Image (cartoon, rainbow, N blue to C red):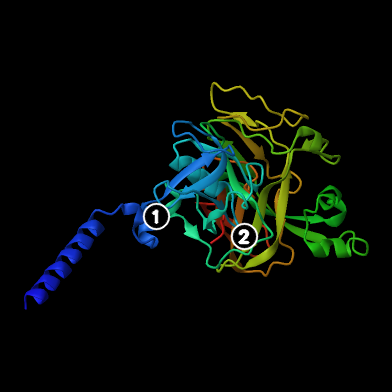
């Protein structure tokens, strides 16, 4: 009996000891479920191949994440990595905004710095990377053949384009032109595909063109500058100036279920200060080297200019559509926000100038992967 009591006493003591040890265990060693993963998440930029000092402020480097409060670090890979994700990184680190980002090996590769997070998708308005989405399936982009890492450069000041909504609906109208009067526009691929198929046999065939102006104002804290070096800008002989961005804006027409109904048009622009707020002097023009949009200024492409339209010749009549306009649509230039880069308007199309209308334009974000 005494041996049994001794055995029972030792058993209870052992359980109490184990319980005490468990209650005082380091929280880092807790099971890494979804909840604890993101609660323990840490983020940093690292631009060296050595261990990063705790007090160093790094504004450019590979993005590194930790899910164990900084004990171990890893990198990021994503199919749709863009300025949206990069802006969240800079915001979370209190480093401003993303001026550049890429997936590259400039700061090492995934063999040396293995991925710890893959498939990140952000809108760009999140305050933390933990609030972003994830790709539904494991991204094929992040396979053994790819060793690139997400890299970001953060700055305190950045440009921010805002599309003027009012001028689109206010000035839009339906125009009719023969192909023979649209030679410059055809050189710049501003018409639907069938126009090129019939130009030789029907040179005077009429095209229905939905015209509207585009005004992009820089409401940011830094000038909007083209991504390409001026030596790579394209000379457009019809317009007699350089275009510094070959895809500055996109124009598309969708049905009410967002199924595309008219061939989209990708507009190339020369960038200039068409006008500025009181007290600001325009600095950029369409000459070589000097293109851009200054802070507090805007660039307007007027309704009467070539290619400032959508070819709606084959669009079914007497229906309501969505006209969607977007600037900097491919995120080629870093901006403070992409929530003000788009507009969506109701287009009622009859095929007749007097009854075709564009109305109820609302602000729309650039589309992002989901």
Q: Is residue 126 visible?
A: no
Determine the image quadrant of residue 350.
bottom right
Tell which circle, 2 or 1, labels the residue nearer the N-terminal end: 1
Q: Is residue 307 left or right of residue 186?
A: left
Q: Which residue is nearer to you in this view: 201 or 362?
A: 362
Q: Is residue 163 left or right of residue 6?
A: right
Question: In the structure shown, which secondary structural element does the residue marked by tag 1 occupy?
Answer: helix
Q: Is residue 135 left or right of residue 19?
A: right
Point 50% across, 61% down: residue: 134
Find disc 1 in the rendering and name its residue.
38
Residue 95 horizontal/vertical position (percent): 48, 35
Q: Is residue 207 visible?
A: yes
Point 83% across, 36% down: residue: 240
Q: Residue placed farthest to the left in the image?
A: 1
The numbered disc on residue 142 is 2
Label 2 CA crowd tier, 10 Å (few <14, some 14–19, many 20+): some
Q: Which residue is nearer to you in this view: 260 or 33?
A: 33
Residue 270 horizontal/vertical position (percent): 73, 37
């Amino acid at each position: 009996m005494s041996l049994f009591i001794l055995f029972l006493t030792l058993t209870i003591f052992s359980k109490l000891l184990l319980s005490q040890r468990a209650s005082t265990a380091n929280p880092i060693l807790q099971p890494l479920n979804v909840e604890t993963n993101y609660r323990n998440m840490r983020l940093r930029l690292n631009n060296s191949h050595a261990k990063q000092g705790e007090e160093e402020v790094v504004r450019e480097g590979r993005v590194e994440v930790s899910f164990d409060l900084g004990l171990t670090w890893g990198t990021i890979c994503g199919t749709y990595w863009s300025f949206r994700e990069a802006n969240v990184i800079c915001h979370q680190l209190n480093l401003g905004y993303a001026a550049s980002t890429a997936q590259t090996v400039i700061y090492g590769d995934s063999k040396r710095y293995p991925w710890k997070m893959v498939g990140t998708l952000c809108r760009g308005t999140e305050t933390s990377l933990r609030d972003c989405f994830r790709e539904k399936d494991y991204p094929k982009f992040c396979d053994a053949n790819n060793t690139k890492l997400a890299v970001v450069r953060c700055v305190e000041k950045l440009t921010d384009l805002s599309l003027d909504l009012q001028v689109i609906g206010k000035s839009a109208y339906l125009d009719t032109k023969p192909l023979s009067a649209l030679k410059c526009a055809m050189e710049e691929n501003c018409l639907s595909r069938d126009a090129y198929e019939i130009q030789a046999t029907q040179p005077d065939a009429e095209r229905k063109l939905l015209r509207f102006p585009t005004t992009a104002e820089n409401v940011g804290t830094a000038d909007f500058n083209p991504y390409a070096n001026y030596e790579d800008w394209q000379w457009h002989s019809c317009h007699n100036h350089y275009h510094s961005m070959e895809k500055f804006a996109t124009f598309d027409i969708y049905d009410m279920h967002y199924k595309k109904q008219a061939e989209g048009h990708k507009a190339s622009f020369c960038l200039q200060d068409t006008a500025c707020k009181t007290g600001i002097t325009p600095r950029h023009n369409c000459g070589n080297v000097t293109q851009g949009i200054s802070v507090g200024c805007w660039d307007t492409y007027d309704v009467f200019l070539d290619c400032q339209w959508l070819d709606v010749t084959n669009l079914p009549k007497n229906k309501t559509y969505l006209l969607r306009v977007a600037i900097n649509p491919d995120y080629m230039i870093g901006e403070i926000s992409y929530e003000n880069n788009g507009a969506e308007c109701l287009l009622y199309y009859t095929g007749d100038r007097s009854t075709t209308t564009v109305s109820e334009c609302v602000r729309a974000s650039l589309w992002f992967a989901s």
